[in-house]
Amino acid sequence: MKVLQSYWRDGSRMPRIVGIDARAFFPLLIALYHPREWSFIAAGVAMVAFVVMEKKGYTLPVLLRAIRHRLRGTVVHARAWWHHRRNYE
């Protein structure tokens, strides 16, 4: 009897198409919906930007979090009560 391997550990991996993250191909799908020369150029530029961003170690959610952190700054003004450090000594 053959034992089948479980691939549940691969469930969180992002799919890749020709070595490129699959999320980079969404601009191409939009360009196929609206086929104009400028939309294919914009999709190509977006795909190249996603590839360069991935080579630098960023994914889109990580990049958006980094931008939000830069805009927000280092001071967090509202903290939950359990995050406060209270040293009354």
Image (cartoon, helix red, strand yellow):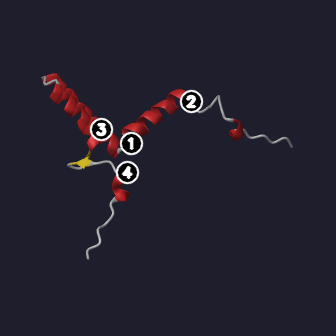
Locate residue 4, reporting x and y percent.
29, 68
Q: Earlier in the sequence, mark 2 or mark 4?
A: 4
Residue furthest out toward the bottom: 1
Residue 10, quarter of picture: bottom left
Residue furthest out toward the right: 89
Instruction: Identify the element where label 2 is drawn.
Output: loop
Within-10-Å neighbours for mark 4: few <14, some 14–19, many 20+? few
Residue type, mark 2 in image: Gly
Q: Which residue is mark 1?
A: 58
Instruction: Identify the element where label 1 is drawn.
Output: loop
Residue 89, quarter of picture: top right
Q: CA distance from mark 4 to mark 3?
A: 19 Å
The reply to whether discs 2 and 4 touch (Cβ–Cβ < 8 Å) is no
Q: Earlier in the sequence, mark 2 or mark 1?
A: 1
Locate residue 19, reporting x and y percent.
24, 50
Q: CA distance from mark 3 to mark 1?
A: 9 Å
Q: Which residue is mark 4?
A: 12
Between label 2 and label 4, give the one nearer the viewer: 4
Q: CA distance from mark 2 to mark 4?
A: 31 Å
Locate residue 36, reporting x and y percent.
13, 22
Residue at the image position 54 percent from the left and 28 percent from the top:
72
Q: Earlier in the sequence, mark 4 or mark 1?
A: 4
Please tell me whether residue 19 is drawn above or below residue 77 in the rendered image. below
Q: Which residue is mark 2?
A: 73
Please tell me whether residue 88 is drawn above or below residue 70 in the rendered image. below
Residue at the image position 38 percent from the left and 42 percent from the top:
58
Locate residue 20, reporting x and y percent.
25, 46
